[in-house]
Each structure stands twice: as C-alpha cells, then as structure tokens.
Image (cartoon, helix red, strand yellow):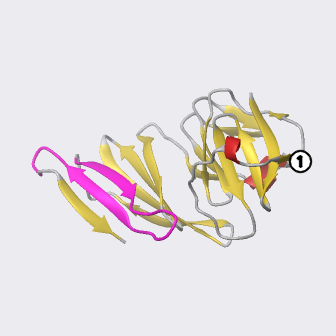
Amino acid sequence: TLYALCLRVSGYSIRVVPTRFFLYSTRVLPTRFSLCLNALKLHVLSAWRKLDVPEDIKVSTFKDSFMFELRSDWTVGGQVYNQGSLLAIPCDKFFAGDMAAAVVLFSPSSCQSLEDKTGTLSFLVLSVLEDVKTKLMFWEYKEGTWQSLGSFSGLGMESVSLQAVDSDANDELWVTIQGYTRPTSLYLSS
C-alpha cells in the first residue's frame, strides 16, 4: 500500500510518499533532489491518501512523471502489467486515479529483462539483458509524451554501466564498458 500527502512549500507542490519526495511546479526543476522537511514551513493541502498499488512496487521519478518498476503482476483498470515491467505516468494523472495514462516503457519477455535505467535531462536509457547480452533502449520525454528512439545491441557479452553526468542540466552520460576481452573503458556520451 502506498500513501501520499500533498504539501505546499514556497509555491511548489510536493507529493510525499514515505521515504520518497517528488517536487514539481510549472517551472523547470531538477529531476532529482534531496529535501529536508525540518527546515521548511509546510502547508498541508490534503490528508494522507491510500493509493491502490502493489506493496512491492519500486517508485522513482522522471520530470513530472512517476516511474513504476513492477516486482509482481499488477491488474489495474482492466489492464494487466507483467512483473518486471517499467511504467511511466504523469503524477497528476496518477493521483487522480487515471491509470489509462500509463505508458509501458519496458515489458519483459522470455529472453529479455530490465537490468537498469538511467535518466538525463530529456532522455531515459534502459539497460536490458536480451539472451544474456546487453541491449540499450532509448526514450525521449518531450512535451509530456514518451518517444522511443530505438535500441542498440552491438555490445555482445560486455557489461555496460551508465551514469548521468548532471541529469538536471544536460543529456551527457558516463558510460563504463567492461568484458572478458575488453579492459574497463570509460566514455563520455552526449
């Protein structure tokens, strides 16, 4: 069970999920941040609300959207989302209970599983294992919609690690590649 509380701090609305905070407004804001509630005056806009989501769901944010990584199958709104899927939904739609707005960014298959995800200012890169080989899938978030930009799977059995340089300011990534026949190599990608 997931609970949420709406707060207002200095003109920003905050959706609070236990141990997770999401800050948004009409202004462009960092996609990740830390917030010390003890240092701020808070105005409570609503009471804690119980949200009907699986207890084992993993929640993160990207811009104005929640990202849900499913650890078990989830049936909502007549739609079945498989264990291992990655869903994105705008926060406002989620809090309004409109799960029809959810976009499936990744759905596992018998030969594919989601290994990791990395967000930059405008892009989300998914690291997928396909037949035990690394495959990168690219998504762009533009004007409130997700666009698939395709995938890259020419890495073979090598391990790929991605880390955003500064996800609040640009789309650059640190890319670390290592394998049995390749020494650990670090690249900067933009």
Q: Which quarter shows the N terminus?
A: top right
What is the x, y in percent for residue 9? 77, 55
Q: In this view, does 116 lie to the left or right of 10?
A: left
Residue behind mark 1: 45
Q: Eyeballing the image, is 2 above or below 162?
A: above
Q: Can residue 100 be seen in this view?
A: no
Q: Which residue is drawn at 22% across and 48% down?
A: 158
Viewer-closest of 130 and 180: 180
Q: Is mark 1 on a helix, strand or loop?
A: loop
What is the x, y in percent for residue 115? 41, 42
What is the x, y in percent for residue 15? 75, 47
Q: Is residue 163 left or right of residue 179?
A: right
Q: In which quarter of the image is residue 16?
A: top right
Q: Which residue is drawn at 57% across and 33% down?
A: 83
Q: Residue at x 52, y 65 (%)?
A: 168
Q: In which quarter of the image is residue 13?
A: bottom right
Q: Which quarter shows the C terminus?
A: bottom left
Q: Is residue 95 left or right of residue 46?
A: left
User: Which kind of residue does numbered mark 1 sit on?
Assistant: Leu
Q: What stretch is highlighted in magenta?
A: 158-182
Viewer-closest of 116 and 7: 7
Q: Residue at x 37, y 45 (%)?
A: 130
